[in-house]
Amino acid sequence: MRNKQHKQIGFKTVVGLILVLALVSAALLAPVLATHDPHLIDTENWLQPPGAGHFFGTDRLGRDIFSRVLYGARVSLAVGILAVVLAVIIGTVLGGFAGYYGGLADMAIMRFTDVVLAFPSLFLIITLVALFDAELWLVILIIGLTGWPRLARLVRGEFMRLRNTDFLVSARMLGSSHSRAMYYHLLPNALGPIIVSATLGVPAAILAEAGLGYFGLGAQPPVPTWGNMLRDAQLYIRQAWWYATFPGLCIFITVMAFNLLGDGLRGYFNPRQKV
């Protein structure tokens, strides 16, 4: 049973990691892999089906969808990864502080966390983006600032579990400061759940960015994103099936890849799944 479960966990992790690396590589190599200028308008070849000249066909302005999908991957992955990095930093700092010190600090931070969680994150993101200019950095900032509460709760629980362990008590008796105890002793032991949460948070951030792009609140044209490509394609779904299929398929594969990787890592770091 143990070997079978380890093989399943390893398979998920490997498949997810391969897909994630392939997606990141395609995004980084977009200028090399793209067959056309993603912004080039060719009205003579609009809504062309997939073929030798255009692998994924063309859109309503004759732009190459394959090239736009590659450049859209840059935006989606950048938003997903950078927003999660910001959320991890905020959630780890606040959750670690609350879990280590407890008392009034814990109560104040957790009540603030509850207030943030009380608002539906997608509607909060849409509202904030709509109030300001829909710049890419603002989308990353807002998604990151609304994505930390659950991670903060997770880190708080890990720090509360570890703060009374023998190794930390010994470190404190030897003169270790509070900041050193948290950074060098507690944080390394809580990295497993943090990594898993971050990995599973990337697809959520990518979906949020795609949703904003679909509603016209994300990165604005002519910058290609998977969300605004789907928005442009909605009127041509029956006429040109490829227009919405390939951006949507990219979102599906990316979300699946990170979920597989996160699920595999969760099984690896969670001892209860190793019995």
Image: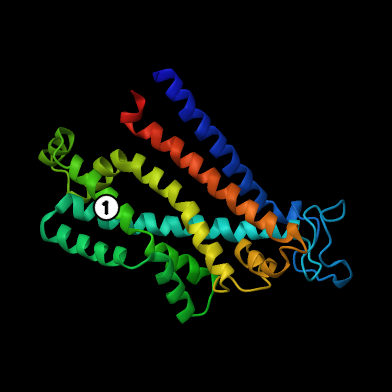
* Type of amino acid under label 1: Arg
Report whether 57 appears left or right of 17. Answer: right
Classify 232 as above or below 185.
below
Indicate the position of residue 4 as horizontal and vertical percent values: 45, 20
User: What residue do we see at 37% from left, 54% from top?
Assistant: 88
- Residue 8 visible in the snapshot: yes
**Exactly how many numbered labels are in the figure?**
1
Q: Is residue 88 above or below residue 12?
A: below
Residue assigned mark 1: 153
Residue lying at 73% horizontally and 61% vertically, measured from the top left: 243
SS assignment at label 1: helix
> Residue 101's spot in the image, x, y percent?
15, 53
| Residue sitting at x 80%, y 55% | 35
Can residue 70 be spotted in the picture?
A: no
User: Where in the figure is residue 40, as x and y percent of width and height?
Assistant: 80, 69
Residue lying at 54% horizontally and 33% vertically, measured from the top left:
14
Which sits in the foreground, 47 or 209? Answer: 47
Q: How is the image coloured?
A: rainbow
**Left or right: 47 as drawn, with respect to 183:** right
Q: Residues within 10 Å of mark 1 (few under 14, many from 20)?
A: many
Q: Nearer the viewer, residue 141 or 43?
A: 43
Residue placed most toward the observer, 132 or 217 = 217
Q: Spot the residue most to the right.
A: 44
Q: Taking 263 as reference, is 229 left or right?
A: right
Q: Point out the image quarter for the C terminus.
A: top left
Q: Which quadrant would the N terminus be assigned to in this image?
A: top left
Q: Position of residue 252 (x, y in %)?
A: 59, 50
